[in-house]
Amino acid sequence: MSRDLADKIGSDTTVDVATADTNDGKNVLKQLPASRAYLRVFSYGSPTILTLQAVAVIAACGSGVALAMVNLVLGNFITLLSGFSSGREIPDDFLSAATEQSLYFVYIGIARFGCIYLYSTIMTYAALRIGRELRHDYLRSALRQDISFFDYGSAGSISMQATSNGRLIQLGISEKLGQIIQAVATFIAAFAIAFASQWKLTLILLCVVPALILMVGTAGGIDAGIETQMLKVYAQAAAFTESTLSSIRVIHAFNLGPRIVSRYATYLDQARDLGKKKNLLYGLLFAGEYFVMFAAMGLAFWQGIAMIARGEVDGIGTVFTVIFSIVIAAAMLNSIPPNMVTFTRAATAASELFALIDRVSQIDPFHPGGKKPADSDGSIDIRGLTFSYPTRPDVIVLEDFNLQIPAGKVTALVGSSGSGKSTIIGLLERWYNPSDGKILFSGTPLEQLNLQWLRTNMRLVQQEPVLFNGTVFENICHGLVGTPWEHASLEDRLLRVKDAAKTAFAHDFIENLPRKYDTSIGERGGLLSGGQKQRIAIARSIISQPKILLLDEATSALDPHSEAIVQKALDRASKDRTTIVIAHKLKTIKSADNIVVMKQGKIIEQGQHGELIACGGVYSTLVRAQELSPDEDRSQPISSHEGQDASALEKTETLGRHHSDAHKRLDLLSEREDYELVPATGIISTVASLVRHTPHLKWWYLIALCTSILGASAGIYPGQALLLGNVMDVFHPTLDQRRGYFFALMFFIMAIGLLIIYMVMGWVSNHIAQSYGYDIRKHMFASYLRQDLRFFDRPENTIGSLISRLDSDAQSLFELMGFNITLIILSVITVIICSILSIAISWRLGLVGVFAGIPVMVLGGYIRIKIETKMDAEIDTRLRESASIASESITAIRTVSSLAIENDILLRYTAKLDTAMSESLMTLVFMMGFSAFTQSVEFFILALGFWWGSKLITMGNIDFYEFIVSFMAVYFSGQGCATIFTFTSSFTKANAAANYFLWLCNLEGTIKESDENRDVVPAAGCTLYELEDIQFAYPLAPEHLVLKGVSLSIHPGQFVAFVGASGCGKSTMISLIERFYDPTSGRIVIDGAQDLSKLNPRRYRQAVSLVQQEPTMFPGSIRENILMGTDQGATGDSAVDDAAIESACRAANVWDFVSSLPQGLSTPCGMGGAQLSGGQRQRIAIARALIRNPSVILLDEATSALDTESEKIVQAALMDAASSRNRITIAIAHRVSTITSADRIFVFHRGRIVEAGTHSELLAQRGTYAKMCEAQNI
């Protein structure tokens, strides 16, 4: 069924989302009832899939009917056997009739094989197809949401749910669905057979049905409610996980691992507490089911014997047919609860997905309506604009704002951080709708324009550029989406890409990459430096020749040489094109046609550069603050050190984190570090390792094992075989009614015993499952945070992939180590005890039955497990790749929407899903043959057992009692074996998950706290650094040296700056000093004696603070984010009072902003700090670094997002703190004005230091540094 039809089911509202009203700014998702959501899932099947599913349903029903037919054959055989034992049948006639009945078992086995193969194959394939369509529609719905939806922090949960909930739904509509349909069909057919055989006895036993249905239905409803709450908690945990893994450098820098894990554990605590509410539920459910079933058997035999005695029933065969029909009907109902969790989760997961799918977006990029003017000139008219962010409606960002932006002109917006500049960009992109007023594009209100058309004609370069996992070529080509060149030939597109790269001054460094334009740049462009990313983002924006160009601090990450040339390129790109520029570097907007100075959401000045300078107002003050040395003589020629003009510099740039192709990486890394090269262990070994990994659960394991042994040996099958043999024996030679009543009573006593055993088993199983879910997630997350940076540099360890693994692997282990492991243990013990019992009672029959059938079943099941393990590994790999795409696109939703590449994202996403299906189809077809065989071979064992047992009886080798007990023990042994292999899916997924989990938990980074370095700390508190001949290559590409023999000294209290072209090794220096990596050769000596690589990294980092170029905020309040800089324990409890926080905020010039917020320090930052501007985030990050009171502070472009006034204040505060506390300050800066007071400035080029000195000394040299200064003077 098409997606359009799927959209109609469960959603009756259609709205013109291009003009939809707001929902009062609230992010409310309405969920369907779980049962309705589950049924709606099937609407995602195409007509072909639905037809195939109908065939599968018929096949599942056929399999169920065939299973019920066994009871007729059993009854007939018991009648034959009873007649022969009573002397009414001659041996030859008996053997002939027994052979005929045995053949019926063969026919039933063949029918079962065909039906099971058909329904399991079709339903599994249909589940893959439906899962693909549902995931696609969910991601499409996520991408169509307005940006305000994501401001509430939903991004992480969305990317998780697309993969995790999709998987849960897939499990709930695949093979297990067929098993449930089969169970229902067996239930109905069995009762039909029972009624046809003896209606009065069946009617007496009918009381079993409502009791079981009531228990299962009530438990299902309660379970669904609890499961819904748990999935919501896990979605919140996933959002938190994504936000924190994106900030792994900050986590290492501030030793936040234990604190972050502790916060993550609060989500897990909630989920575990909810899950443990099921302990009593499942205990009562399992206990009640088995009590009802065995009590009913006792009642049936009691009444059956009485009815035979009264002559109302022909013989014991009829009673057995009725009883076994009722037993198998009850057993089928009992088989539902173990699978009920799967269906409950599937229904709940579907409800979660449809809640977003049905949400009507206020601003929908997929909406086809709206105008597409052919003659727009690119003018913009902003009239009476008032705006507050939906997340903070009480804070007015823009108030009655009016501005005319002429077509073909450059308009610059300047002002302090938080003055509303970037908000203007967001409103122009239609990320939000104004609270009041309107914006006209070429005279047409924005809301009347087609959104895709608008964004295609309006390209944005953001302050913090976001690239996507893929090649350089693919990233720049994103700018062609929606243009006539989108589907041009590869050659034409490559020419345009190269032209755009040359214009953006990116071509030369791209040509020096390992595979040039086909070089993969990693998740979010992580393998490039900040400047390189920004230039590729500029190329991406200008390639389509848009009518309007939006530049939000577009050159902030570029070095002065690159900035000057790129600025010229942007000036050329802006010619005759409407351009809106946001800039703190006023040099870049000097030639703007109109400069608009903003403050607190209002315009306070506007005009051209010369006019505003002449006015002597705010703008003039800002300009003077940014001038370097206006009185210096610049008439002398400036030398170009080593010919390092801008072009030469770029020709030598290489990737910030070099890499080679996948095969080379695998060769470079040891097997221990690459999971794909680690040999997998078997399921028994991994389960044993998991048990050892959770010693605190040992008593629970022991209880589970004991109850399983009791339940298996004294309960379901062996005890039942013995009782059945004795009940049968009461009819020979004549009916012993009193003895029959005794054994009927024994069934009731057994029911009471099982009531207690299964009550404990259900309780313990759920307790273990919930505890395991908690432990696995917590340990995996903690293991992620413990890893070195090199772990996250690996291509397979994208954030989306790691989150997908965290959820899916935990879920797989949860499913195995809870109920399934108990039932598996129970079944294994049953097989062993029943086999021993069968052989002990009659070795002639037992040996044939056990060794002719069980090994064959085990072999078939083993082959299925091996095949399914390989198939699951392939599918999981593709699903993790698709999860990475979903995670990356949702996290970068602003970039995705500004480029209007939603459809391109969907195509990439579904391509991964399609690959998963195509690669698994043939394996699936082959694998299901073994699955069907293991579930049908028991009938061939029955046929052999009946035939061989009949022969033994006629030969006088065994009697009636021995045959019944031995045969039923073999039969129950086969059923136990078949039960084990119904969990093969759990086996394969859990085994793969356990292998990864155990590998991850044992994986240790090379930079870690150990017994050897635990007490090795900086003796003098990091007051002196000496770098001796440092060479460094990133671990994934040792052949590419980033630093080549760097030597320098940093003395106590010094302010040291690193400058140079993008990619020259500056940020790598920060990474080495922060000890994210150790040098390839050379060493860093601390305090004149201690090798940095020998120090305890945790204790060392306590003395160091880091502020990155792209500041990171964690979910939580402003207070919580600033306190991340303090040295707290795992709980995060802090003795730091608000006065200290205020002091740090004032030093970072952010206190006025924070105190103006209604919630003050308690204001939520949003996921990733989404509710704050770039400048506000950077100032809070600086406050976080300052509150630590470090001995060393590392500033990686720490003030690049600040306005001039804030920058001066923050810079002064940093310098004051440095001088008063004898603190070492190490800064990377492209804005040279921020480092003129540095005690030592090191100029980097090609991984080497080419100049060093103070500002004035370097100016006197008239070299590279002087050229940078000249480029930045206004």
Image: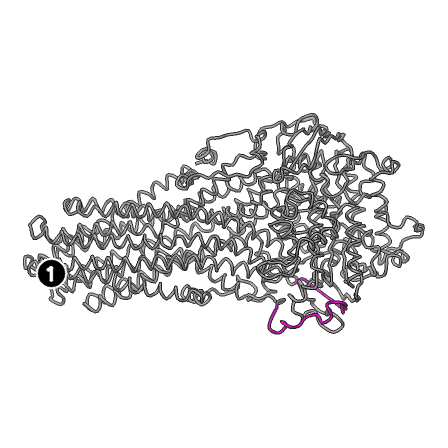
Where residue 674 appears, x then y in whole percent?
56, 63
Quarter placement of the C terminus: top right
Q: Is residue 282 left or right of residue 607?
A: left
Residue closer to the observer: 1015 or 944? 1015
Q: Nearer the viewer, residue 94 or 752?
A: 752
Total numbered labels placed on residues in the image: 1
Residue at position x 23%, y 65% from top? 848
Secondary structure category for the residue under label 1 = helix
Q: Which residue is under mark 1?
A: 739
**Where is 329 relative to 1006, above or below?**
above
Q: Is residue 495 visible?
A: no
Residue 832 at x, y percent in the picture: 29, 66
Q: Nearer the viewer, residue 150 or 679?
A: 150
The colour mode here is one colour
- Which corner quadrant of the image does residue 930 belong to? bottom left
Picture coordinates of residue 189 (x, y %)?
23, 45
Residue 972 placed where, x, y %? 25, 59
Residue 1251's quadrant in the figure?
A: bottom right
Region of the chain picked out in magenta, as a range: 1009-1034
Name the quarter where the N terminus is drawn: top left
